[in-house]
């Protein structure tokens, strides 16, 4: 007989993880990173490995504990990439840890890394966008309020001008299915 922990004993991370695992019908690998900001808890990265049905998908947990005056909702980040390289998964936790409390992570926000994210790709920046239709916009984490999910879309730094010229929605539409391709050509 297998015993499961009752919901009232689960931590917010366990609630968040179980909702995502139920949605993906898969077990997430969880990575923990010590906070670089004093008085803030660890940052966790939940990773769902790539398979034939979905790309490598990574979620942050820890951003929602930081406050920013321009951030009106509790936010966590996700990233989807058709790649095997775990650098794509870990960059979500890295950015969450480094920028929480300093960056509002609003839709349309540009984040420049200044270096390639992965050896297999020249993508070197991100734009924050609303999540895909296959991922819910909000997830419960066991606290009183829900957490809003936003997606990090890897881009080339030279595409920032195109995003400003075309608008974010049109830019995403022009990328189409290639938005998860690490080897896509710049727009």
Image (tube, helix red, strand yellow):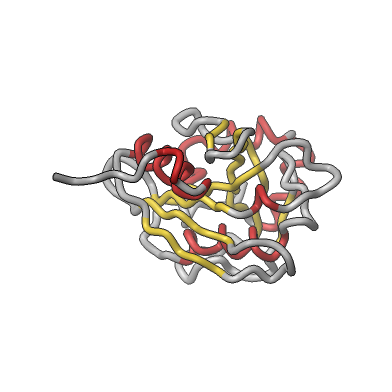
Residue drawn 44% across the image and 46% down it = 10
**Numbered marks: total:** 0
Closest to the observer, 155 or 46? 46
Q: Is residue 144 shown left or right of residue 134?
A: right
Q: Position of residue 7 (x, y in %)?
A: 41, 38
**In the figure, 187 relative to 43: above or below?**
above
Q: Residue at x 56, y 64 (%)?
A: 122
Of residues 14 and 111, the one drawn nearer to the viewer in this rendering: 14
Q: Residue at x 64, y 39 (%)?
A: 129
Q: What is the quadrant of the N terminus in the image?
A: top left
> What is the x, y in percent for residue 18?
39, 42
When the figure is inspected, residue 169 is found, relative to residue 110, above or below; the finding is above
Q: Residue furthest left?
A: 1
Q: Hey, which residue is sitting farthest right in the picture?
A: 69
Which quadrant of the figure has residue 4? top left
How far across and how far down the image is residue 175, in percent? 55, 39
What residue is rendered at 60% in x and 65% in y? 94
- Seen as rendered, the residue at the extreme top is 133
Q: Position of residue 52 (x, y in %)?
A: 26, 44
């Amino acid at each position: 007989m297998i015993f499961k922990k009752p919901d009232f004993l689960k931590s917010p991370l366990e609630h968040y993880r179980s909702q995502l695992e139920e949605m993906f019908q898969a077990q997430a690998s969880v990575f923990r990173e010590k906070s670089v900001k004093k008085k803030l808890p660890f940052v966790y990265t939940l990773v769902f490995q790539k398979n034939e049905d979905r790309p490598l998908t990574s979620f942050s947990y820890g951003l929602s504990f930081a406050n920013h005056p321009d951030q009106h909702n509790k936010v966590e980040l996700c990233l989807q990439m058709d790649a095997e390289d775990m650098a794509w998964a870990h960059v979500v936790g890295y950015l969450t840890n480094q920028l929480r409390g300093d960056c509002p992570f609003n839709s349309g926000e540009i984040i420049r890394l200044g270096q390639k994210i992965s050896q297999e790709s020249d993508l070197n920046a991100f734009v924050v966008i609303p999540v895909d239709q296959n991922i819910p916009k909000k997830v419960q984490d066991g606290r009183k309020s829900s957490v809003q999910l936003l997606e990090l879309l890897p881009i080339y730094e030279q595409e920032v001008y195109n995003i400003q010229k075309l608008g974010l929605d049109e830019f995403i539409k022009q990328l189409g299915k290639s938005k998860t391709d690490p080897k896509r050509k710049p727009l």
